[in-house]
């Protein structure tokens, strides 16, 4: 991998990768997710830098746009209590953004961002901004995680920042690509877990493993197989045009939950099999465990499972997968 060891080098590498990466739904969705998983199996920080840039490129492509050459991108759509980013029309400069956006990963490192802002009390719209604008303030924040320490996430304050609209009101969350992109994140979770599994497999092959070690290795393999199958099926459904509208939401929610569950199960078995040694003596393993634990919390666990169940109840005729 030629990504480098600091975030600036990783972003420059991500930009180069993004120039040739397959777009979701463009005929090679599985290759796109395989790329993300392969990177994550080696280094989750690099994958965490790459994934939002690729997502931004795909979003812009859906709207018929291309990123300017050599630009790096983040995507920020989270909302938080006590802060709101508002978009208003300016007579002289089109749209401008005012307010504060929480949870902006890599805002201090990327050149551009796609950010959601409120255009009225009920509707949001996506906008593209330049982070170098003097009216953008990347706050110092208090990013002190055990994992993904280099992927600094912080609020951003904007004071009359010029912005270019991307899509129409509500488009960002309503498009099929929103759910396809979410599955891409799950591919990163899967890849990160492959890295953990390889550490367990190496230990099992290095000597005479007992039955418990073999059991843990078998459970990890089965969990990864389930996640991999879910991702492969999802790519096929997308390419066949069967993952649009409500089906895109169902597929995205289902696959993310399957993969997240498999990741948590595999991680538990790896931890039980390896014991405290690697967690206290192997920096690479310690970092991988911490990175994956934080990244996986983008999945809302039982809440997302409940959302999946609600979809099945509300549209029984459409959603009958069994």
Image: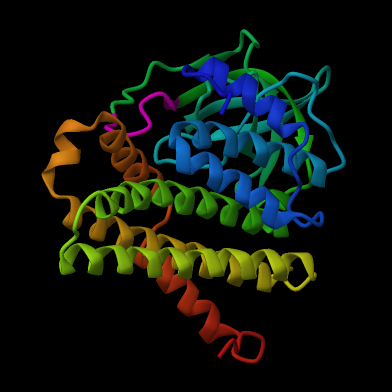
Q: Is residue 24 left or right of residue 48?
A: right
Q: Which residue lies furthest to the right in this view?
A: 64
Residue 5 in the image: state x and y as whole percent. 47, 18
**Magenta: main secondary structure:** loop
Residue 109 in the image: state x and y as whole percent. 54, 18
- Residue at image position (32%, 53%) is 201
- Residue at image position (52%, 64%) is 228
- Residue at image position (35%, 26%) is 149
Q: Is residue 37 left or right of residue 17?
A: left
- Residue at image position (55%, 15%) is 8
Q: In this view, does 157 lie above or below 304?
A: above
157 and 122: which is toward the camera: 157
64 and 295: which is toward the camera: 295
Q: What stretch is highlighted in magenta?
A: 145-154
315 and 31: which is toward the camera: 31
- Asked which colour scheme the image uses, the reply is rainbow
Q: Is residue 255 above or below residue 106?
A: below
- The answer to if 121 sits in the magenta stretch is no
């Amino acid at each position: 991998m030629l990504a480098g060891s600091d975030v600036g080098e990783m972003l420059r590498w991500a930009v180069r990768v993004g120039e040739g990466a397959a777009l979701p739904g463009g005929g090679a969705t599985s290759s796109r997710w395989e790329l993300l998983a392969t990177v994550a199996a080696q280094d989750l920080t690099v994958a965490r830098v790459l994934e939002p840039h690729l997502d931004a490129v795909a979003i812009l492509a859906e709207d018929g746009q291309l990123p300017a050459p050599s630009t790096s991108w983040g995507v920020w759509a989270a909302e938080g209590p006590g802060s709101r980013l508002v978009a208003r029309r300016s007579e002289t400069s089109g749209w401008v953004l005012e307010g504060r956006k929480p949870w902006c990963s890599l805002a201090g490192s990327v050149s551009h961002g796609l950010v959601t802002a409120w255009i009225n009390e009920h509707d949001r719209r996506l906008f593209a901004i330049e982070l170098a604008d003097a009216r953008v303030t990347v706050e110092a924040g208090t990013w002190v995680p055990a994992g993904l320490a280099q992927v600094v996430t912080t609020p951003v304050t904007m004071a009359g920042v010029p912005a270019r609209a991307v899509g129409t009101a509500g488009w960002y969350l309503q498009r099929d690509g929103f759910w396809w992109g979410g599955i891409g994140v799950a591919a990163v979770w899967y890849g990160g877990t492959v890295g953990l599994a390889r550490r367990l497999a190496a230990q099992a092959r290095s000597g005479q493993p007992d039955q418990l070690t073999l059991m843990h290795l078998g459970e990890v393999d089965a969990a990864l197989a389930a996640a991999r199958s879910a991702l492969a099926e999802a790519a096929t459904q997308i390419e066949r045009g069967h993952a649009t509208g409500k089906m895109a939401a169902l597929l995205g929610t289902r696959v993310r939950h399957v993969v997240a569950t498999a990741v948590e199960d595999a991680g538990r078995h790896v931890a039980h099999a390896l014991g405290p040694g690697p967690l206290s003596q192997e920096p690479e393993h310690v970092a991988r465990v911490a990175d994956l634990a934080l990244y996986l919390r983008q999945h809302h666990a039982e809440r997302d499972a409940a959302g999946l169940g609600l979809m099945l109840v509300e549209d029984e005729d459409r959603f009958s997968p069994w």
